[in-house]
């Protein structure tokens, strides 16, 4: 059950809009969005989480599509936002849940934790603040001045400086290494919803009330230290409000300076999500019209994986899959070789993986092979690798493969399979370089050469 549903439910005297996915029998994870967004920010995450969790993502009052009647005379404070979410959970009969929080979602979740300490089973916080160190940037300076004065003049300054389209877009694009890849509909939607009649006043009330969260920070810290609830705290390194104080109140810091990339919600079943991103990058890199350089493609591949966890085998496997599909005389084989040269980890271990595939003749064409041309393409790629100097560490495997191709190429009657053996042997002659031919013609018994 991975299809995302949109619904509304009456809670705390209003119609709370929410997105949900996954089986109700699975553990619940509550997603709480931040300013200036809504549950829309989780649209790509929800399908991924729904494979193992019952995902619930509401729009907070004043955001998204939650409708607060005028006669409700709702006061927009973080205490009231929390009460509304509590009523929302009660309406859905949810008693225990993990929370995934971002920005404004953090104080709401921690207030929930204080009110219902036994309800929360785990916390994932993405750029969620609970420390005064996270309020020291220029963004918060005029807001803190407003906290002290409460003056209309300071309120008006925030209105003009913060509640505008450019600031909304800035919150999506600032610090991103690829701002042009961020889909504009997200910040256009947020901006349009912020511009609804009366919404500026709602946002200014919440910004003014944010000071009450700061007063609760000591209690939040005590909860983190004593509750025993597991916490995963992640903060983007380019966020100017980034704080490193979490590790003071969390017993173990698990992940530090981790690189992340969005995972495609449309990953085919045969691919791991990370491997599929490698596939997409390599596919784009190989297009004739591609403007991506070899170095850029290599950097993109490396950035997919968390620091220190590059799946070299996945990278190599994807390249081999492409090599089998590329015609043996096509220049894209050389592009693949150059790409692997730019990924040192792949270059260092490629020979081991290829040796495993080659030793058991995994790539050889069988008598009933319907696509023997893949064998020719594969051998062309291996020959290019050898000629590049990348694969010299496993010369014995290369020689074994080359010799097998030569032997098989003249022992069978003319068929598509036999032709594939002939063409496979030809690839070594064409592309493997002088070193292989000299080794093959070495005037000693084969057993002296091939171990």
Image (cartoon, helix red, strand yellow):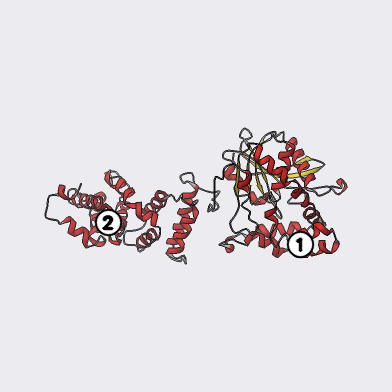
Residue indicated by mark 2: 392
- 98 over 348 or under it: above or below: above
Comparing labels 1 and 2, the label whose residue is closer to the camera: 1
Q: Earlier in the sequence, mark 1 or mark 2?
A: 1
- The reply to whether dot 1 and dot 2 touch (C-beta < 8 Å) is no
Image coordinates of residue 442 in percent, x first then y, are 14, 56
Q: Does residue 240 appear anywhere in the picture?
A: yes
- CA gap between label 1 and label 2 equals 63 Å
Is 378 left, or right, of 61 in this rendering?
Answer: left
Residue indicated by mark 1: 142
- 122 over 439 or under it: above or below: above
**Residue visible at 87% across and 47% down in the picture:** 73
How crowded pointer 1 is (Cα within 10 Å; few <14, some 14-19, many 20+) is rated as some
**Residue visible at 42% across and 49% down in the picture:** 314
- 330 over 97 or under it: above or below: below
- What numbered label is drawn on residue 176? none
Could you say which is closer to the camera, residue 311 or residue 354? 311
Quarter of the N terminus within the rendering: top right
Q: Count up the numbered dots.
A: 2
Q: Secondary structure at mark 1?
A: helix
Image coordinates of residue 367 in percent, x first then y, are 26, 44
């Amino acid at each position: 059950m991975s299809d995302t549903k949109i619904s509304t439910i009456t809670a705390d005297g209003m119609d709370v809009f929410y997105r949900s996915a996954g089986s109700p029998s699975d553990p619940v994870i509550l997603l709480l969005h931040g300013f200036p967004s809504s549950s829309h920010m989780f649209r790509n995450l929800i399908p991924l989480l729904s494979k193992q969790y019952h995902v619930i993502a509401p729009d907070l009052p004043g955001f998204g599509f939650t409708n607060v009647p005028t006669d409700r005379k709702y006061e927009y404070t973080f205490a009231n936002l929390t009460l509304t979410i509590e009523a929302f959970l009660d309406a859905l009969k949810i008693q225990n849940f993990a929370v995934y929080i971002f920005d404004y979602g953090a104080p709401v979740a921690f207030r929930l934790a204080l009110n219902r300490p036994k309800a929360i089973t785990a916390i994932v916080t993405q750029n969620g603040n609970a420390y005064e160190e996270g309020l020291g940037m220029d963004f918060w300076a005029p807001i803190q001045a407003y906290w002290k004065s409460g003056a209309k003049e300071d309120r008006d300054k925030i209105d003009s400086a913060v509640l505008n389209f450019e600031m909304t877009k800035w919150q999506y694009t600032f610090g991103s290494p690829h701002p042009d890849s961020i889909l504009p509909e997200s910040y256009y939607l947020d901006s349009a919803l912020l511009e609804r009649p009366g919404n500026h006043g709602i946002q200014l009330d919440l910004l003014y009330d944010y000071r009450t969260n700061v007063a609760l920070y000591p209690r939040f810290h005590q909860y983190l230290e004593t509750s025993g609830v597991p916490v995963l705290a992640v903060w983007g390194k380019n966020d100017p409000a980034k704080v490193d104080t979490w590790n003071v109140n969390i017993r173990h810091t698990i992940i530090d300076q981790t690189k992340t990339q969005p995972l495609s919600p449309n990953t085919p079943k045969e691919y791991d999500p990370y491997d599929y991103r490698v596939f997409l990058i390599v596919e784009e890199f190989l297009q004739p019209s591609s403007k991506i350089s070899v170095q850029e493609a290599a950097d993109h591949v490396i950035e997919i994986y968390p620091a220190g966890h590059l799946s070299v085998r996945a990278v190599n496997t994807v390249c081999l899959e492409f090599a089998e599909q590329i015609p043996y005389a096509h220049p894209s084989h050389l592009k693949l070789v150059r790409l692997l040269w730019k990924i040192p980890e792949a270059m260092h271990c490629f020979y081991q993986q290829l040796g495993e595939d080659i030793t058991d003749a995994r790539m050889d064409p069988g008598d009933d092979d319907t696509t023997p041309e893949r064998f020719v393409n594969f051998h062309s790629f291996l020959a290019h690798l050898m000629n590049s100097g990348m694969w010299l560490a496993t010369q014995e495997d290369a020689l074994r493969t080359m010799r097998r191709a030569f032997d098989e190429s003249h022992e069978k009657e003319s068929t598509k399979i036999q032709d594939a053996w002939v063409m496979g042997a030809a690839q070594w002659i064409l592309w493997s370089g002088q070193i292989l031919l000299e080794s093959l013609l070495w005037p000693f018994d084969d057993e002296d050469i091939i171990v």
